[in-house]
Image (spheres, rainbow, N blue to C red):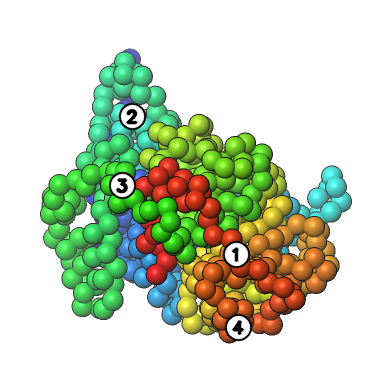
Amino acid sequence: MPPRLTKTLSLSEAAARIPDGATIALGGLSYFNAPMSLVRELIRRNARNLTLITAAVTGIQADLLIAAGCVRRILTPYVAFEELGLAPAFRRAVEKHEIELLEIGEAFLAFGLKAAASGAPYYPLPLALAASDCVRHNPLYRIARDPFSDRDVLCVPPLVPDFTLLHAQISDEFGNLVLAPAASMDTLLARASRRVFATCDQLHESEAMIQADLQGSIPGAFVAGVVHLPGAARPTASPGLYGVDRADFKRYAAAMKSDDTRRSYFAACAGAAVTEADYLRSLGALPPEDAAPAAAASAPLEAPASKAELIAAVLARAVRDGEFTAAGTGCWEVAAGLRLAQLTHAPNLTFTLGGTAAVNHRLPYLPISINTEQALVACEARIELDDLFDLELAGQFDVMFASALQIDRFGNLNLTCIGPYDQPVFRGPGTVGLEFAPRARRIVAFFRQHTKNIFVEKVDFVSGIGYGTGPGSRAQWDIPDSVGPSLVVTNLAVLDYDPRTLQMRLQSVHPGVSISEVLANTGFELHVPASVPETPLPAPEELRLLRTEIDRGAMLRKLIS
């Protein structure tokens, strides 16, 4: 019997098989499981004219390729570094038209990949998703007639990467990849792709993996080659083995501020004379995984609530027992508020956390990254990220929590850009999941700052539709006025919407804040009822739960200055 062919390659062999002009999908999500060694090797070989397809939340893996001049076009719903800020190269390249951006939301990404994975010619979505301005700026969205309902639907094409680049914790010599249960879309990216190349931290013999009950998350049948290289996800984390190197993220962001420092950075990490093994050794010891923060000195219950604690308490009161919802990337106040609701008035509330989609986590602290794998060891269940998108599309979410760069009087949200789309003054991270907004029954927005630059007369880009331009304006997309924005919570006030005009109105002002201060920081005429009460402070029991059961690391006491 002829021997079975192994799929192990060197890093340079894998990169050499990816030609200029290829469409590549980048695995990993946010800080986790990014194929960074493969990215750096493409830069070493001076790859050019690549089209990138990213995961739902991506960061340095895409930004590094853009900064190196390897990218011609990108399809992404979101590029940023979570609490470390925006992705500098992506922002600059889009603002200066150095790359072509096809504006998409998570629905376009997820269901375009599902169409490719299943061999479907396209994927039909509810017409309500056409309310996002992504549809106006990306010609790949199409509206067609559904032959079964005889109604219009929004269609997205199959997204078929020529290559998908992944990082796995373990592989065997035949390319069977074992991925830690962290936030990712990696299995969907692999199924949609023509070929997969992966790095792995550990390479085990196939028989040893079988005996150890280590079945692959991604079968070797989908994998063209695997590179064994410990540390290949750095500076992102490889869950179970090493953590996020946030210091390196900060070094990268600082290096991107000038041409000289940018050149020095690339010479050190991806210069022609620098091997990847040399570079990884230069980084030093593998960083530890994120740990539970040390418990902060307990504040007396009579100590004033911080602004973020107040916001969390208001968000907790906004949900009802038995509802289903989620806390997304960067939404620490939401995560705290939902857990507070479970511990007070809504024990049957169900919520997921970040890209891990950990269900009803029990962490007694707020993690640095909402997408952390830590939640997976302290939760009731897990929903695969691909399946979570199905639930959003199906309208299973009772509440969508959101924030943005801008919001207007009708609750339309903009996370995409400031200024004209074609000539932005400021490029934001992207539409992300706001495309799904009309599929939720209620939208609750929150803002750490309440200013005229955020609360504007008209948003510059509709990432997520609110009430459009007023009553009946969303009928063209089959969105009834009975669903939409319900509440806005800021560092100054709580606002809701007039049921007749659907315009924002003042519901309450926080202690120490005047109505005139709220009006002075709102860029449109805000309806003010005859009587405006003061926002109730968190009750002593709510503060006790926040400080001892939910946020032992005191993130909420430091989040808003």
Question: Label 1 neighbourhood size at 10 Å, few (<14), some (14-19), many (20+)?
Answer: some
* Cα distance in 3D space between marks 3 and 4: 39 Å
Instruction: Write the residue at 16% across / 63% down.
Output: 268
Question: Is 268 above or below relative to 242?
Answer: below
* Cα distance in 3D space between marks 3 and 2: 45 Å
Task: Give the residue pinned by disc 2.
Answer: 174
How far across and down, in percent of the image, does residue 437 sit? 66, 57
Q: Nearer the viewer, mark 2 or mark 4?
A: 4
Name the foreground residue: 354 vs 15: 354
Task: Give the residue pinned by disc 1.
Answer: 535
Please identify the quadrant where the C terminus is shown: bottom left
Element carrying mark 4: helix
Please tell me the numbered disc located at residue 12. Answer: none
How far across and down, in percent of the image, does residue 276 sit? 19, 52
Name the foreground residue: 510 vs 27: 510
Task: Give the residue pinned by disc 3.
Answer: 295
How far across and down, in percent of the image, does residue 412 sit? 66, 69
User: Are circles 3 and 2 on residues that touch, CB within 8 Å?
Assistant: no
Task: Give the residue pinned by disc 4.
Answer: 516
Which amino acid, mark 4?
Ser
Question: Is 18 above or below relative to 85?
Answer: above
